[in-house]
Image (tube, rainbow, N blue to C red):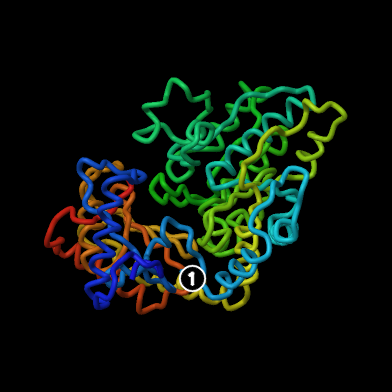
Amino acid sequence: MVGDRDWGLGDRDDDEADEVALDAVLLQDAAHVWHPYTQHLQAPIPIAIARAKGAWLYEGNGRPILDAISSWWVTTHGHCHDDIVAAIAEQARTLDQVIFAGFTHAPAAALAAGLCARLPRGLSRIFFSDDGSTAVEVAIKLSLQSFANRGQPRRLIAALDHAYHGDTFGAMAAGARGVFTHMYEPLLFEVARLPDPSEGDTIRALDQLLQTRGSELAAVIVEPLILGAGGMRVWDERVLQQIRERTRAAGVHLIADEVLTGFGRTGPMFACERADVAPDLLCMSKGITGGTLPLGATAATEAIYDAFLSSDREKTFFHGHSYTANPIACAAALASLELFDEDSEDDRIRIEVAQAHHLSALRGTPGVHAVRQIGTIAAVELTGTTGYLSGVGRELASFALQENVLLRPLGTVAYCLPPYCTTNEELDRVYEVIQRFLDGERAETPGSGGPVDD
């Protein structure tokens, strides 16, 4: 059944009731829902998911679908993890919501302390928000205002080519220009572009920028070690170290957008740890609650926090959200954080090794342009017309879904980014589907239910 709700089905037998309930969901959706990243004139009927457990989603009719992308990169330990579900239920019975301006509560205070204990050194303050995009907005605003509060205004932000930082206006401005942003181009603020470290000389460009406009530059924002939505482009940790060296010497903030990379995706808890780098600001979301509830967080150094301490109230950070530090979301995040133990690390290592084995087998296969990996994140770049609107990604997504595997290619880049509970046998299933696609198999009904980031 779709949830436990009484859908007014009377005494129908279970199978018939399931079908009627599923039809009701789809009819209501078609009449009233506007889905993200969806061209509704062309989109297939969405798939109604009734429940989930572990690495699996279950359609309203009971069909299982293997979630190979952690449901947009958020599900870490697995769907409906018992410990996180219990924490949510207990907190919901105790305190559901309270304004966070002038008030606090145990889950938020404990989560802030727990995060700071695991973050790279020097990050000692947590500002809570709603999601990854708002966490980035907070980081950019904190950087800009901290300079202004000290009487040294700087207005320029630098970002990498092929970057993606979110869909709100500040995050869009920091991200690469393209199909996602061109409609809003006249409204986006100026950002200095640095070459993608996977294909260009980022450090030379940064040196030139510091020489010509260093006094204007407030911050450099990066997705550390992998450009996610830009095509899962992995880059060298030595470049991150050099960016940190340059920015520290110039008094420029380094913002690490770890919305994707945080919470074990690249191996350690945070990607910056791989390079032994401590940024000035670090953005978190996605996996922070284990994928159960929306929550964003921006970590800052004490020096940035101190720039806002003043008897002048105009130097306050005037930013907030109605659901800032929601107690239930914080309780979920605390429960998730406690699950990052030795067993979790062992699972991540196992997945990393299994992914490497499969990528090795695919390297050089006809139809494969390149493979790449960092931690538990693996990507297979297919041959074909590049860009988000590439047809090959849609074809693979459609075929995979027919075979009960959820993939969501970024144009020609298919990636596997699984929950940490995913077994080696389940990973075998994902790569079997990819191989069969490369061998020429296609969905029986092309385009039906095939999600793709476009």
Q: Nearer the viewer, residue 93 or 139?
A: 93
Residue 259: x and y, percent?
Answer: 54, 51
**Label 1 secondary element:** loop
Horizontal relation, residue 445 to residue 422: left or right: left
| Up/down of 327 relative to 213, above or below | below
| Up/down of 391 relative to 159, above or below | below
Residue type at the position of mark 1: Cys
Looking at this rendering, what residue extends furthest in the front direction? 10
Looking at this rendering, what residue extends furthest in the left direction? 444
**Which of the 4 image quadrants contains residue 222?**
top right
Q: Nearer the viewer, residue 454 or 374?
A: 454
Neighbour tally class for label 1: few under 14, some 14-19, many 20 plus, Cα within 10 Å: some
Q: Nearer the viewer, residue 312 or 393?
A: 312
* Location of the N terminus (image quadrant): bottom left
* Location of the C terminus (image quadrant): top left
Q: Which residue is mark 1?
A: 80
Residue 178: x and y, percent?
Answer: 37, 33
Residue at x-position 42% and y-position 55%: 72
Residue 36: x and y, percent?
Answer: 36, 45
Residue 368: x and y, percent?
Answer: 26, 57
Residue at x-position 39% and y-position 69%: 51
Horizontal relation, residue 448 to residue 115: left or right: left
Residue at x-position 74% and y-position 48%: 125
Looking at this rendering, what residue extends furthest in the right direction? 311
Q: Is residue 454 visible?
A: no
Q: Is residue 127 visible?
A: yes
